[in-house]
Image (cartoon, rainbow, N blue to C red):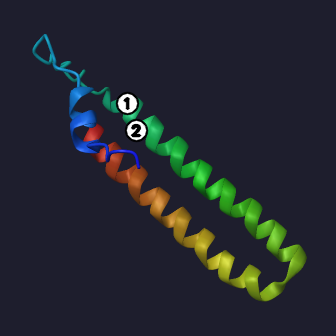
Amino acid sequence: MSPKKNVASKKNSKAKIPTKPAVRKKKAKSDPVAALSKVHQVALKVVEKLRKTLDAAILKEEKIAARLNVAVTKAEAKAQKSIAKASKLVS
């Protein structure tokens, strides 16, 4: 029979001891125009993906297409809201 190994002590022995204090990087001030364009890009990508899915669903079945159409409309509205909100923050 082999003796039981102490797993906990083995893990602790491998723990790295920091020699230097942790240096935190300062967060760069975000550029509001860049943030707005990013919001816009993401919103457009989401809507574009939903449109592609919708087009594929129309070819397959109309029931699914009807539900997806609602989803696309909601996504577009959400995208417009987020873009408007971001542009308000910028100005």
Residue occupying the point 46% across, 37% down: 38
Hey, what amino acid is under mark 2? Leu
Q: Nearer the viewer, residue 5 or 29?
A: 5
Secondary structure state at the residue bearing disc 2: helix
Q: Please state which of residues 89 and 12 is positioned toward the viewer in this rendering.
A: 12
Residue found 61% across the figure and 78% down from its top: 70
Q: Position of residue 26 (x, y in %)?
A: 18, 19
Locate residue 8, reporting x and y percent.
Answer: 23, 43
In the picture as drawn, the residue positioned furthest to the left comes out as 21
Q: Which residue is labeled 1 in the image?
A: 33
Q: Which residue is mark 2?
A: 36
Residues packed near mark 2 inside 10 Å, few (<14), some (14 to 19) or many (20 plus): some
Q: Is residue 31 above or below residue 66?
A: above
Left or right of residue 55, residue 84 in this image: left
Which residue is at the far front? 1
Q: Is residue 86 left or right of residue 8?
A: right
- The front one of 84 and 37 is 37
Q: Are marks 2 and 1 in contact (CB under 8 Å)?
A: yes
Q: Which residue of the protein is positioned furthest toward the top in this rendering?
A: 20
Amino acid type, residue under disc 1 in the picture: Val
> What's the residue at 66%, 83% (across, down)?
67
x and y, in percent, of residue 4 in the image: 32, 47
Image coordinates for residue 25, horizontal then vertical, percent: 20, 18
Q: What residue do we see at 48% from left, 57% from top?
A: 79
Considering only vertical position in the picture, is 84 above or below 7?
below
Q: Residues within 10 Å of mark 1 (few under 14, many from 20)?
A: some
